[in-house]
Image (cartoon, helix red, strand yellow):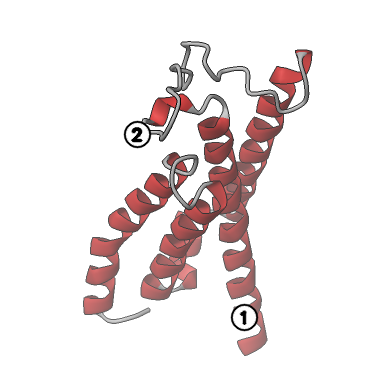
Amino acid sequence: MMSKIVRTQANFLYPFILIFGFYIVAHGHLTPGGGFQGGAVIATGIALVIVAYGYDRVKSWIKKSTLTATESIGLLCFILTAFIGLSTSFFYNFLANSGLLFGDKVSYGANPGYLNTAGTLPIMNLAVGVEVLGGLGVILMYMLSYGKEVSK
């Protein structure tokens, strides 16, 4: 476990890392980034907390089974989104230009940056972000648990 100063700074930075990660996920269809990059940023927040508080303490807060379930939920949401459009084709963007959620009409020319014009892409970005968050979180937790076994 690190000093009080490191833990205080980790407590201060963690919410901003989460917000920035979800911002990258939400704007992935308009800017560089997306589900994978945003999920990796959020997993970096988990790594920060582990470094600041130590593996033994964080192990009681974040369970490996929860992260594994998070990864599975993200994968299932991604696959479900792909199969919903199967009446036309696999991964068909059934929400684009539909007027429904994320389906406003897209004007010709440069996109002014509206979030609700991508159809199913934000849903897929969110699913990938959740999956990457769970997957990288599990990897971090397992790497640190094996590191503790080797050091004994």
Residue 20 percent location from the top left of the image: 35, 53
Q: Is residue 47 left or right of residue 128?
A: left
Number of numbered labels in the structure image: 2
Name the residue at 70% across, 19% down. 84
Inter-mark Cα distance, 1 to 2: 48 Å
Compare marks 1 and 2 and give the one earlier in the sequence: 2
- Callout 2: 10 Å neighbours few (<14), some, many (20+)? few
Name the residue at 48% across, 70% down. 56
* Residue on which the image places disc 2: 112
Q: Is residue 51 left or right of residue 36?
A: left
Task: Tell me if residue 90 comes above or below residue 56 in the rendering.
Answer: above
Q: In the image, what residue type sits under mark 1?
A: Gly
- Nearer the observer: mark 1 or 2; the answer is 2
Residue 66 percent location from the top left of the image: 57, 47
Check disc 1 and report its element: helix, strand or loop. helix
Residue 152 visible in this rendered orientation of the protein: no
Q: In the image, what residue type sits under mark 2?
A: Pro
Q: Quadrant of the N terminus?
A: bottom left
Judging depth in this view, the residue of 12 and 40 nearest the camera is 40
Residue 128 visible in this rendered orientation of the protein: yes
Direction bottom: furthest residue? 151
Task: Tell me if residue 9 comes above or below residue 127 in the rendering.
Answer: below
Check disc 2 and report its element: helix, strand or loop. loop
- Callout 1: 10 Å neighbours few (<14), some, many (20+)? few
Judging depth in this view, the residue of 37 and 11 nearest the camera is 37
Quarter of the image for residue 51 reads bottom left
Q: Confirm or deny contact between disc 1 and disc 2 (CB under 8 A).
A: no
Name the residue at 51% across, 52% down. 39
Quarter of the image for residue 144 reads bottom right
* Residue on which the image places disc 1: 147
Name the residue at 58% across, 67% down. 140
Q: Quadrant of the C terminus?
A: bottom right
